[in-house]
Structure formats: C-alpha cells, structure tokens
Image (cartoon, rainbow, N blue to C red):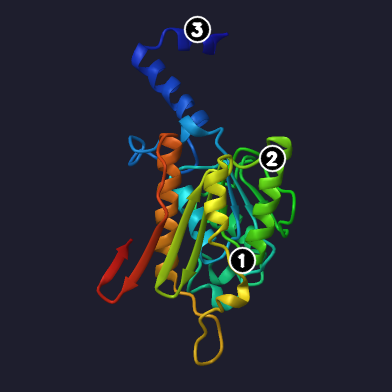
Amino acid sequence: MELKQTYKNWPCYYKDLITGLLFWSVIMPDISIVRHESVFDANKHKDQKFTIIGAGATGSRVFAGLVDFGVTNIDVYDFDIVESHNLANQIYFNSHIGMPKVDALASYYKTKTGQNPPDTMRFFNEKVTDTFGEPFSILFLLTDTMESRKNISSAFIDSINTSSIGPRYVIETRMRSAYGELYFFDPWIKAETEKWTSTLFGDDDYPDEVSPCGTTISVGSTASLIASSVVWEAINHVNDITHIPQNKTLFCTPLGCIAA
C-alpha cells in the first residue's frame, strides 16, 4: 500500500520512464531493430511465418539474415550435422562441429542475442518429405538436391490443389562456386508454378563442381550474396504484398558481381 502511494506521488516523467521500460521489455525482440525499424519493423509482422528447408550454405545465412532483421517467427528443417568443412561456407562455429545443424542454429541465436530462441522459432532435425510446417508461410526451399525439391514442391502443390493449404510464397535458389540462380513464385498461381517447375532438372544432368581432391566446391561469399538477396526480396514482399520479385541470375567474377 505504501509503495502504491509512493508511486502515485511520483512526477509524471518517472512514471513515463517506468512505463516505457516495461513496454520495451514486453514487445521488443531479442535483437535491437532501431537501426532499420523504418525499413522493416519485425514487430508489425510477428504473425508471418518464415520456413527454411535446408540449413546449409544458403539456408544458414538466410536464417542469420532474418534474425538480423529481428524476425523470430521461423521454422527450420534440416537432418544433417555440422562438419569441419562447413565452417568456411556456412555460419557455424568450431564449437558446433558434430551438432545437428538445427541445434547449431539455435546455439547461434543464443550467442548472437544472449537469449534462448523464443517459442515461435522452431527447429526440426528431420528430413522433409510429403508433409511439413505451418501453412501460409514464406518458404525458402534450399535443399541439397533437385530430387528433394521436386518431391517437396509436388507435395505442397498437391496440398494447395486438394486442401487449399500450402505456403504463401516460395523462394528457391541454386548455387555454383561463382554463380547463383534465384527463383520466386506464388504457388497459388498455376502459371507461376508451371514456369518454375519447367526449370527443374535431374541431379545427374547437372553434376556438382568438384575440386582437384574430389570434394564439392562451395564458396561462402557466393552463398552470402544469394542469401542476402533472397532475404531482401522476402522482406520487400512482406512489407508490400504487391511487390513481385523477379527471378535473378548472379554472376560473381574477380571484378565484382553482376545480376541479370
């Protein structure tokens, strides 16, 4: 009672300060968005789910990019573990070696923000087959093989056609050492879906680049460029649903990168 009476007699600016601090602690994300809030305010889009399938070179960096924007409503699917060769082209640390990649991303978030991932951020250490995730999310389809992309896309296209349930928007990328392809399509529009599926091919038709020692080549800087580009397009689309990203091809050369 005495405390309440004391608070009642405090000057207004003290009351405003306490109210502001309480408000800040309740609504603010784990990472400060003050530097880019005018560009994208994550608090205004908390209900928009982002789903990442594949947490490798591009997927792990997409996760990091969304976190930097203050996004916390994220689902990540991956069934692989972090290996030593992943450190050069993915966001993982030496301490993550041997961990499932999804657990390593949760660890990355805690290291980055000082907080455990919120309940809206979910990590699935599993292979995506015919059913997955929350409907009406923005889907980043970033798996290692074309076969898996065909299977996953076939599943959500069938779901849209039969049950009217599926992702709101799909972003898919392909990468070589100094080259990237970025695809964006609305799976609810048949013409867009058919245009995208026409670009799919067999894994044997487009073998991986390999180094002289026989390992697959993957360059972190190329992955960073691709990830940053698709995160930006996703953010632009959330800010303005009428914004329709255009498919892009990125060429990286010793003199810089060109978008076509």
Residue under label 2, please give it: 161
Q: Amino acid at mark 2?
A: Asn
Quadrant of the drawing holding the N terminus? top right
Q: Which residue occupies 48% across, 48% down?
A: 66
Element carrying mark 1:
helix
Q: Which residue occupies 52% across, 53% down?
A: 195
Mark toward the start of the polypeptide (1 vs 2): 1
Q: Amino acid at mark 3?
A: Gln
Mark 1–mark 3 contact, CB under 8 Å?
Answer: no
Residue under label 1, please give it: 146
Task: Indicate left or right for 50 with 180 as reference.
Answer: right
What is the distance, in whole Å, between disc 2 and disc 3 at their CAs? 63 Å
Mark toward the start of the polypeptide (1 vs 3): 3
The image quadrant of residue 249 is bottom left
What is the distance, in whole Å, between disc 1 and disc 2 at their CAs? 22 Å
Between 230 and 88, the one nearer to me in the picture: 230
Asked if one can make out residue 200 in the rendered structure from this viewpoint, the answer is: yes
Quadrant of the drawing holding the C terminus? bottom left
Q: Amino acid at mark 1?
A: Met
| x and y percentages locating residue 36 in the rendered image | 34, 41
Q: How packed is label 1: few (under 14 Cα within 10 Å), some, or many (20 or more)?
A: some
What is the distance, in whole Å, between disc 1 and disc 3 at their CAs? 68 Å
Asked if one can make out residue 32 in the rendered structure from this viewpoint, the answer is: no
Mark toward the start of the polypeptide (2 vs 3): 3
Q: Which residue occupies 57% across, 60% down?
A: 142
Up-down relation of residue 59 to residue 119 (above or below): below
The mark found on residue 5 in the picture is: 3
Q: How packed is label 3: few (under 14 Cα within 10 Å), some, or many (20 or more)?
A: few
| x and y percentages locating residue 50 in the rendered image | 56, 44
Between 183 and 202, the one nearer to me in the picture: 202
Up-down relation of residue 167 to residue 46 (above or below): below
The image quadrant of residue 126 is bottom right
